[in-house]
Image (tube, rainbow, N blue to C red):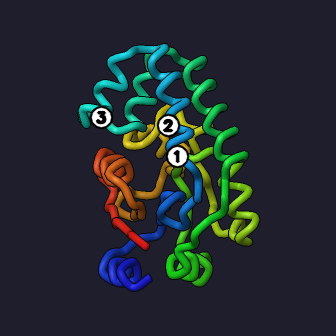
Amino acid sequence: MKVLEEVLKKQKKTHIVFDFDETILELLLPWDIWFSKIQTILDRYDKTILQDYKDKKILISEAQNKAFRLGGDSARKEINKYTEEFESTKLQGVRLNNELIEFIKQNSERYSFSIWSSNSRAVIDKVLAEQSMVDYFKTIVSRDSSEFLKPDPSGFKNLHDGKTPMSNYLFVGDSSNDERAAKALGMDYLKVTF
């Protein structure tokens, strides 16, 4: 991945955090089905949450975070359980970002790689195993292991080793969720597309 390689030549980075879906690969899922059920769940917590999303005041991840704050563990468990079930049963395949995957495979000894994703851990593990990529990532933070979804920066505490300066981290992602989470942490960010 030439853009990533150019950034790394200019900046001293030791830790690279990747988003999963639509960054390393794309999960081929009928997201409209997921969204339909999530609307029903969010409405039970507060009908204004979805209106804010429809009015483009917040992202769908932020709508889920609002439900998590309102409903606590029960909301988090319900939404995460449904998402895991949906991703596990409706996955139709993946589209690989071959250039980025090749970079990861060739540089796994040079950098500490992690994943920070809003996908379920079960699907991340399954897809990484199918692609023979499990061993390339030191840490994986999924929706199951994070109190809130990106752009909330709280999930990063599960990635940070407690001693590496933030200037040594680079977040590679594809969305405003990723970029805003990186900005909230003071972490450099690189947007990728494929």
Q: Secondary structure at mark 3?
A: loop
Q: CA distance from mark 3 to mark 1?
A: 18 Å
At 50% from the left and 50% from the top, the residue drawn is 160
Which quadrant, please, contains the N terminus?
A: bottom left
Give the image quarter of residue 79.
top right
171 is higher (above) or lower (below) than 50: below
> Is residue 193 something that shows in the picture?
yes
**Residue 157 at x, y = what percent?**
49, 42
State left or right for residue 49 relative to residue 26. left
Circle 3/circle 2 CB separation < 8 Å: no
Counting other residues with Cα less than 10 Å from the Cα at mark 2, is it few (<14), some (14-19), or many (20 or more)? Answer: few
Circle 2/circle 1 CB separation < 8 Å: yes
Q: Report which residue position mark 2 lands on.
A: 35
At 51% from the left and 22% from the top, the residue drawn is 40
**Residue 8 at x, y = what percent?**
38, 78
Circle 3/circle 1 CB separation < 8 Å: no
Q: Report which residue position mark 1 lands on.
A: 31
Give the image quarter of residue 112.
bottom right
Of tags 3 and 1, the one toward the viewer is 1
At 39% from the left and 60% from the top, the residue drawn is 174
State left or right for residue 40 relative to residue 120. left
Mark 3 or 2, nearer chain start: 2
Counting other residues with Cα less than 10 Å from the Cα at mark 1, is it few (<14), some (14-19), or many (20 or more)? Answer: few
Identify the amino acid type marked 3.
Ile
Q: Report which residue position mark 3 lands on.
A: 58
